[in-house]
Image (tube, grey):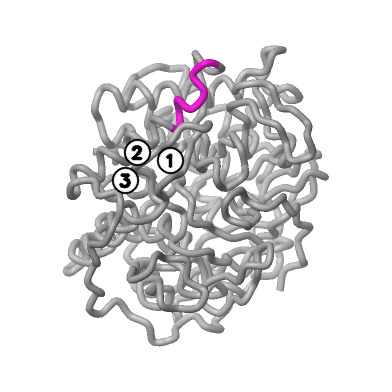
Amino acid sequence: MPDDPQTHVMPPVRGLGHHVLGRRGFLALTGAATAVVAGAGAAAAHDGRSWGPRPSLPHGPGRHHGGAAGAERAAVAFVRAATDAYPARNTGPRLAQSYTDELGLFSTAFVYDNALAVCALLADGRRSSVETARVIGDGLVFAQQHDPDHADGRLRQGYNVGPYTFYDGTPQPDGFVRADGYANVGWQFGFLGTAVGDMAWPGIALLQLYGATRDPEYRDAAVRIGEWIVTTTWSTAPLGGFSFGVDGGDQPVPNGSTEHNVDCVAFFTMLRKVTGDRRWTAAAEHALAFVDRMWEPRSGWFWTGTNDGVEINRDPVPLDPATWSRLAIRERRYDGALDWAATALAVTDDAAAPTSQLPDGERVSGVTFSTASLTSTAQYNGITVHPDGVWLEGTAQLATSLLDRDRRGDRHRAEDLLAQVRHAQDVLGGGQHLGGVAVDGGVVAASSLLDTGFGFGYFQVQHVGATSWFLLASTRSNPMRWGGLG
């Protein structure tokens, strides 16, 4: 079992009464890691759940977006609105605010979400979408080139992109670019560290942007990201791979994540194709060797990783390595992980359940975050999580991966999942805001409050990451493959 992480407990989420640790709950204000790379175990990995017949989708009141095409247009509009949320402050390169204001993270922009947004906008392909993708890509390059403390190619976990007053009354007056000309790192919430996955995904996005525009600045920024990962996190421990990254105090976090190493396989493989430099082949193979050590062929899943580079963690088992391994590695020997995830992590959120937060009469089906999510009784600010809460981001990931695998029945299963996400887009998240302005069209992170099993939760607020994965699935795109965006 992993060590208990040091958590950064945030004030209550406005309008929801929750708190959140951010994307993967990574770093605390003190600079200590808040979410250890937990392992995965066999317990609760298969409880007999399966997709089977889907519940009918009730009509009811909601924000209907006019079918599949309308849902896609609304999702694109949401991502663009998140990018343009503070027009008076951000007139040049900028990043998209990750969640609507109601979550209580104010103007936080996670680089992972922004990388997904770049890929999703490129997959959409319309000129306006590509222009917005370039704006975000320019924001990533600016952040890399204008870090207030480092000049080594890193990106932070998150940035501020608009002014706000913190819960203790401390003002944060700047947009994405501070008054002193540096990037506005997310200091008040402690999003100061650098995780390997939060580097590889922007690297992937910048390479995809280079592919679409042939602007060498994006390629060069991606190369700098790759050099930081290799220089800083190459592990010589027995399990190998790349370690987790550094915390807010620039101290190494020794854990190794399967998810992050899958990201690295995709990123370094793309770097090899784009640059022709053979060193990236060696880096991709180093990451792939770690992923292969995490594969459990008898059960058909991936262990999550390691705390120390020596021992494999075995509880809980998350979704991400199953879906992303298909997109990044595309080897048949790993394909059973999708079937495991579609069965073992399947959930149906029913408004009639005591801990559901769905409107009366609603049902939404999909998958949850991990095996721990299925049995958790955790509370966030006094609210008990719902064990059948649907993780909409992960549900869209699974649809994306099934479409990429494209075996018999996969398209039907993926379309079934996408229908559920579109329904959630229609009926959940209404009345929310970005930078104080009402917004529509985004996909909420979760149908009801759910616990990931890694020390943080997902909530019923519109989310750039979940919306971007929905767009990637809707356009049958693979962001982890060179040329895979439409």
Badge 2 crowding class, 10 Å Cα cut-off, few under 14, some 14 to 19, many 20 or more, is many
Residue at horizontal 57 percent and vertical 65 percent from the top? 452
Mark 2 touches mark 3? (CB < 8 Å): yes
Q: Which residues are magenta?
A: 82-88
| 48 versus 343 height, above or below | below
Residue at horizontal 79 percent and vertical 39 percent from the top? 168
Residue under numbered circle 2:
120
Mark 2 touches mark 1? (CB < 8 Å): yes
Res 83 → quadrant? top left
Which x, y percent locates residue 426?
A: 30, 52
Callout 2: SS: helix
- Distance in Å between CA atoms under marks 2 and 3: 5 Å
Left or right placement of residue 60 versus residue 437 in this view: left
Residue under numbered circle 3:
472
Res 256 → quadrant? bottom right
Is 83 within the magenta?
yes
Residue at horizontal 44 percent and vertical 42 percent from the top? 464
Q: Main secondary structure of the magenta part?
A: loop
